[in-house]
Every structure is written in structure tokens, then in C-alpha cells.
Amino acid sequence: MATTTTLTNALLLLLFTLLLSLSFIPSFSSSTDSFVFGGCSQQKYSPNSAYESNLNSLLTSLVNSATFSSYNNFTIMGSGPQDVVYGLYQCRGDLSMPDCATCVARAVSQVGSLCSQTCGGALQLQGCYIKYDDTTFLGVEDKTVVLKKCGPSVGYDTDAMGRRDAVMTGLITAGGPYRVGGSGEVQGMAQCVGDLSLGECQDCLVQAIGRLKNDCGTADYGDMFLAKCYARYSTGKSQSSYKAQKSSNEGEKTFAIIIGLLAGVALIIIFLAFVRKVFGEHGK
């Protein structure tokens, strides 16, 4: 009986160790949370005003909605036109819902400190984008350049530049608001904000991709963010600001393995407890 008790205690310790290890599993969405750009409007709202209350409601709605949808927009009405808040969020097309929700929550927390008491704010993280304002921008096409970033030139490599141009062309001809493509080490990605029509999305991406190729030339990577769409590429020549991200399948597999181990340990403990009870009853 002492042996059974010792083994049971050891298994309980193992179960506790596995449970504790869950808190140390690295976040597979950490790269999606890194900052890309942010901006705030000049106009400010008064503390404890109706606008502030409506803005808080809007930001809460963004976070809640991101748990089940990769894009949504909201209009929070007020007692007067000056209290109306418009806002949206969007996650990168390959993100899982848990990663999307985590990214949007991180963006909301960051924009609060970045744009304190301003009526409008926008924040782009690697995996998601949020924006709010007191004037409507929903459904409005906007091709203003928000961020352009080009990597160092690696010289004109005919093969690499040819692959890049082919990938960029593929992004233009592909359908849908989220597009990815690759050829060898060259990877590309493009996405429109979900409030654009398919025609407006195509128009925006054609401009973003055209500017990206022209402005970044022979750079080993490039990012072109317009107000309502973006395009990015990496030739793989050096560490870039964008590499095609895998979804969190590896994290899900790791989690599933741990859950399986926990279930197995739990069954063994239940079995040993049953055996101990049976032998205990026979020993009486």
C-alpha cells in the first residue's frame, strides 16, 4: 500500500508540474503584437464627457467582437452629433480567433495611452489594426500613404527581383481582401480593410503594390501601408520586417499534447485510487 501511495503522490506531483508548465508556454502570437505604426487626431474630448463614455463602449465592443470575427465596425450613437464615435478593427487574414482577440485587446490597451483624450486614433500591430474617430471614415476609400518602409538595397539581383515582381503581380490578380503569395524565398502579403468594396480594395492594392515596387526598388524587403490597405514583401536576403507568419498550429499542437498528457495522468491516478480502495476493503 505504501508503494501505491508513493506512486500516487508522484503522479499528483507530475500533474501539478504539467499544469504549472502551461503558464510558461511561449505565446505564439507575440510576433503579432509588435508595433508597426500609430497616430492620433488633434481634437480632444473632455474628461468624463459623453464622448469618452461612448468611446469606452466602442473599444469594449472591438475587443468583444474580435473573439468571434476577424473584422467588424461599430457606430456608437450619442445624444448629439458631437458624441457619435465610429470605429473598426481588423485582424490579419491568417490569424486564429484567439490570436485575433489577443491582438485587438493589446491594440486597444496601447492606443489608450498613445492617444489619451483625443477624439481619433489608429494603431497598426503586426497582426491587427484598430481605428476610431468622431467623423465617419467607414466605407470611405483612402489611399493616403501612412507608412513606407524599405530595407537596405541588396543590388539588382535579376532572379530575386524577378521573383518579387512575379509575387507582387500575383497579389494584384488574386481575389479577396487578404492575399498571400510566394516564390522561393520571396514572400508577399497584402490586405484591405474590410469596409471597402471589392472594387475599392483592388484599386487600393494596385496603388500600394505599384508604389511599393517603385519606391523600394532593390530593397530586400518593403512595407507600404495606405490608409485602407497595405502590401509587404521580403526577398529573404536578410532579417525583414515581414516574414510570412504561420498560424498558431504549432502552439495548438503543443497544447493538445499537454492536455493529452494531463488526461492520461488523471486516468492513472483515478485507476490507482480505485485499486487502493479495493485492496483497502479486502484488507479489512
Image (spheres, grey):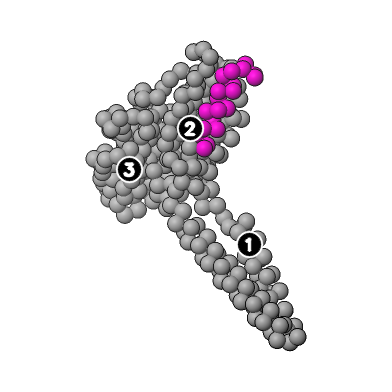
Corner quadrant of residue 215: top left
- Residue 199 lies, in percent from the top left, at 26, 30
Amino acid at circle 2: Ile
Residue, disc 2: 130
Q: Nearer the viewer, residue 187 or 158?
A: 187
Question: Pointer 2 and pointer 1: residues touching (CB < 8 Å)?
Answer: no
Q: Is residue 171 left or right of residue 33?
A: left
Residue, disc 3: 179
| Residue drawn at point x = 69 percent, y = 84 percent | 279
Residues packed near mark 1 inside 10 Å, few (<14), some (14 to 19) or many (20 plus): some
Q: Marks 2 and 3, how far apart in space?
A: 20 Å
Q: Secondary structure at mark 1?
A: helix
Q: Nearer the viewer, residue 252 or 269?
A: 269
Residue, disc 1: 19
Q: Nearer the viewer, residue 134 or 208?
A: 134
Query: Which tag is nearer the camera, tag 2 or tag 1?
Result: 1
Highlighted range, magenta: 46-64
Mark 1 or mark 3, which is nearer the start of the sequence? Answer: 1
Q: Is residue 48 left or right of residue 213?
A: right
Corner quadrant of residue 207: top left
| Residue drawn at point x = 31 percent, y = 54 percent | 184
Amino acid at circle 1: Leu
| Residue drawn at point x = 32 percent, y = 43 percent | 179
Q: Marks 3 and 1, how far apart in space?
A: 39 Å
Say if 181 sits above or below 14 in the image. above
